[in-house]
Image (tube, rainbow, N blue to C red):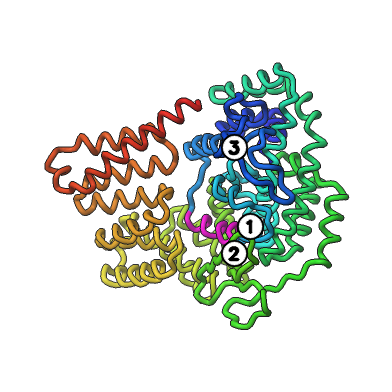
Amino acid sequence: MLPFAHQIKAAALRRRPPKWPTLALAASLAAWPLPAAWSQPVPGRDAAPAVSGLPSLGDGQGMSVAAERRLGDRIARDIYRDPDYLDDPVLGDYLQSIWQPLLGAARARGDVAPELEDRLAWEVMLSRDRQVNAFALPGGYLGVQLGLIAVTETPDELASVMAHELSHVSQRHIARLMARQDKMAPWVMGAMILGALAARANTDVANAALAGSQAVAAQTQLNFSRDMEREADRVGFGVLTGAGFDGQGFVGMFDKLQQAARFNDDGAFPYLRSHPLTGERIADMRARLPLSSVVRVAPGSTAAPPGALSAPTSAGGLNLNLPPPGGTAAATSLPSPALHALMAARARVLAENAPDRLRTQLQSGQVPNATPGARYAAAFAAQRLGQPERALSLAQGLQGQLAGDARVAADHLLLELQLMALATPATAAGTDGVGRAQRLGALRDQALAKGSRAGTLLGAQASLALGEAPRAASVLQAWVVNHPRDALAWQTLASANQAQGQTLRAVRAEAESRVAQRDYAGAVERFKAAQALPSTLRNADPMEQAIVDSRLRQVEELLRESLRED
């Protein structure tokens, strides 16, 4: 889904606030001509050789790659501040287990040129929204909403949508649409920008302003966007099967959307409006199925045909060995259907705020023939309903029903629920202290051994809960060295440093978490707060003090650049 006139059109027609309202400004700016300084390539920086099947990068037609990335970063900065933005490490790891093989397959196919891979973010962002939707953003960002994860039945179906959106980015549809939109009348551009600006303060005013220009804008780009959708289907199908997923996932997802369009389109399926499902598109995907050969290896199996992509191992670890540019697809562990069932259940619970519906999920997971997914949802729902003991009991019973990557997810859930239970005084007081610490320590060690983001963060939180702040800090410090844009890891590291009395390091970690979310003004404030600490605290760690001084200068420059762009 392209976040341009189609997405703005849907919001205007429904007369309802968009879930990520601050996205409207950047999205509409992307849909209309930018200043010449943005649209023209920078000699020696934006020029790039043409890649087969792709438009020339930085050729002055529409947006340069650098300008697209800058625009995407501005959108991401607003999304990070939105209440609907969700950083859930467990779901995040699951999305990455799909996204990374797709990206590796696109690179191996030549769809993603090395220069495009280096300059774009290729980041997946998660929204709490219950609507069935996903969308490509400028700069290589992909948005996925909880509703999409919740309704898909297999990892292949979810992967088909992500492959489609990845292809919007790899085929540079944003830049190509920009070239088309450059022919629009200036008054149309002005009306769209005015409406987007109004969205920040009053969505009703924004919808009224947008309505006047929507008819012209939507009709002008309609056919062009449908061509893009067909192209994203074809390229996405190749990426999907090249990554080892079943091409049937495309057809299955199309069937779901077609049924929703026919019987149940009550405004909860924005994907239907921006991705019109024609018989031609559906037939095209069906016709491609006999031509694809997908081999899935069962979890724990050691035998696989040459060149096949292996499924998750019994340890549940994600083996992402992405192919080098120009190479062939390498062996990659794909998520199992059992894991997807748990993650879809998690998405359903996270997207739900109504206690009555959470109670329904709790009841459904306690019947004798409940599926593992229903039991997972029940345990998670019990915790959200304030029933930690029942949540722990359900999670413990779930462990024996699962194996492979699904068992790892169940272990993570149990660790997560134990950490939440510790925050409940009644539960903590009623549990044997020694036995609780032993169980928590065992789960902590298992989580840290996986090396995943969820395992690292949950393991660090467990170390803090057990009074082992130095171990938590050590684990997190090693993680942020390799993942400097992990805001949640920096925040947890700040807690670990504070628990050790290392105030300077704690404040610096808080600042780095702001940088990770591109809140440069907030980061500057925290770095200055670190400099303003008493000299006894600063002089006790001269190396950290020097880092703070250096980082402050760097982030101040980033802040000045962002203000110039705004």
Question: Which residue is denoted by mark 2 in the rendering?
Answer: 323
Q: Position of residue 454 (x, y in %)?
A: 45, 60
* Whether label 3 touches label 1, CB < 8 Å: no
Which numbered disc covers residue 68?
A: 3
Is residue 390 visible in the rendered image? The answer is no
Question: Which residue is denoted by mark 1 in the rendering?
Answer: 107
Which numbered disc covers residue 231?
A: none
**Residue name at image x 67 percent, y 78 percent:** 306
- Type of amino acid under label 2: Pro
- Dominant secondary structure of the residues highlighted in magenta in the image: helix
Q: Position of residue 42 (x, y in %)?
A: 57, 34
Is residue 517 visible in the rendered image? The answer is yes
Q: Is residue 430 above or below residue 32?
A: below
Q: Residues within 10 Å of mark 2 (few under 14, many from 20)?
A: some
Front residue of 450/177: it is 177
Marks 2/3: CA–CA distance: 26 Å
| SS at mark 2 in the image | loop
> Which region of the structure is painted magenta?
89-100
